[in-house]
Image (cartoon, helix red, strand yellow):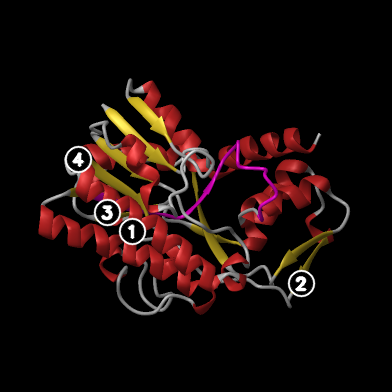
Amino acid sequence: MKILITGASGFLGRFLSKALVNEGHDLILLNSKNCDLTVEASLEAYSHIAFDQIYHLAAWTQAGDFCLRHPGEQWIMNQKINTHILSWWQKKQPQAKMICIGTSCSYDPQLPLSEEYYLQGTPIESLYTYAMTKRMLLIGLMALQRQFGLEYLYVIPSTLYGPHYHVDGRQPHFIFDLIQKIVRGNSVVLWGDGEQKRELIHVVDFVNALLTLNKCEKNGWFNIGSGVEHSIKEFAKAICNLTGFDAMKIQYDLSKYVGARSKVLRIEKLKKAAPHFTPIDLNVGLKETIEWVKGTLQ
């Protein structure tokens, strides 16, 4: 198949691209350097190609407190990106299936993190703008499917981890920040009290689940996660056990931003659609990721 991927140079994009190439597909890989999706005409150069699938991974965001500092820009940038890709899909690529990435930030933390609640309630205030752009992306997919009969799939990941995470100076997701600080040793100060809980899914597991769902599902949305959460302290202890660092030396800065207190996705719908889905053991995945991080710090 002919497949176009936006955000192809990102962490997920590189693993997805590799998996699709291994399946024998013909890919066009887009990133912010070769295609500025905030410009409406940016996709015209690819309109002559009849794509079978479009994977839309591109988004203007970063981890940590980025969303707190750039809410207005996030709204404008992501609405442009999403509107332009959806408009181009409807006008120039209606035969293609559109596969989009959502965010668990869109869930109201007071409601179960189950698909039927994805568009209900209010996302956490610090992530509200980005969360709502992702909700709007799903609403756009639903509207275009309803009016024009287009085909889509929308997936909601928990936090991805694994080797080959981007090291371009952006603020990393919590697990990479944890590993980097502990591997470096010396003074390790973590944000918050350590009791906030998070869920991880290995990037390879995510890609495998996504490709499995894409073969059997359409016009709906699915959580993709491990279904298990751990506190930051528990993650830190596991990393210390794998690196030999003394966990008692870790300090916690209660003044820092921590985001949601708990965030674990319900994955019953995923398990029903992909009954053989079995995530990589956390310690195995962490060990692999730690070794990769060590290599980047040498």
The local crowd at label 2, few if under 14, some if 14 to 19, many if 20 or more residues have their Cα within 10 Å, is: few
Name the residue: 47% across, 34% down.
15
First in sequence: mark 2 vs mark 4: 4
Q: Considering the numbered disc 4 on the image, is that residue within a helix, a strand or a loop?
A: helix
Q: SS of the residue at dot 1? A: helix
Q: Nearer the viewer, residue 252 or 73?
A: 73
How far apart in space, not on screen, are marks 2 and 4 (Cα)? Answer: 46 Å
Q: In the visual, does 92 lie left or right of 59?
A: left
- Please tell me which of labels 1 and 2 falls first in the chain: 1
Mark 3–mark 1 distance (CA, rounded to whole Å): 6 Å
How far from the left and from the top, in percent, is residue 287?
64, 38
Q: Which mark is residue 87?
A: 3
Residue that mark 2 sits on: 253
Corner quadrant of residue 137: bottom left
Q: Is residue 161 magenta?
A: yes
Q: Amino acid at mark 1?
A: Thr
The answer to whether any part of residue 260 appears in the image is no
Quadrant of the image occupied by residue 66: bottom right
Tell me if 116 is positioned left or right of 177 in this view. left
Can the viewer see residue 166 in this picture? yes
Which region of the structure is painted magenta? 153-171
